[in-house]
Image (cartoon, grey):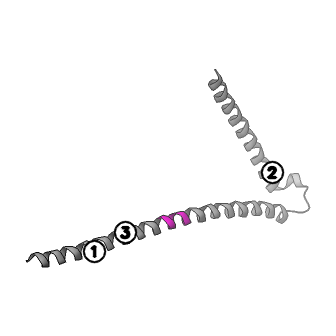
Amino acid sequence: MSYSSWRIAFQCSEQAARAAYARVEELATEAARLRYQVAQLEGSLAHWKANHADMATRCQYLAQRKDLPVDRIPAYLAHAQRIADLTVENSYLTALLAGRVARRAA
């Protein structure tokens, strides 16, 4: 192989390598953009699922027996139990946080 043909082959392979590297960079950028979009959509999905759960809870109140007082409706009882559970959890976390703050101050 002569020097000129070797040089042409090298230049062609160098151009091909540059084109391949540029394509890889394009694909990496596209992958990052898609990962960001997926993260946004997952956040939106969580938001709408929470809204649906809240609406389902509201509908349970309306769909259950209208002749019973509200404190006897099963949905209300489940809701009251959830409030009690969250109150206990909140007091536990508040005590835990107060203990950490006290340890830092000491």
In terms of image quadrants, where is residue 100?
A: top right
Residue 80 position (above or below residue 27): above
Distance in Å between CA atoms under marks 3 and 1: 14 Å
Residue beneath disc 1: 15
Q: Amino acid at mark 1?
A: Gln
Magenta segment, principal secondary structure? helix
Q: Amino acid at mark 3?
A: Val
Q: Amino acid at mark 2?
A: Leu
Mark seen at residue 24: 3
Residue 92 position (above or below residue 86): above
Q: Residues within 10 Å of mark 2 (few under 14, many from 20)?
A: few
Mark seen at residue 60: none
In the image, which residues are magenta?
Answer: 32-37
- Numbered disc 1: secondary structure: helix
Identify the image quadrant of the N terminus: bottom left
Residue beneath disc 2: 77
Instruction: Check if residue 102 falls in the magenta segment.
Output: no
Residue 17 lies left or right of residue 76; in this view the side is left
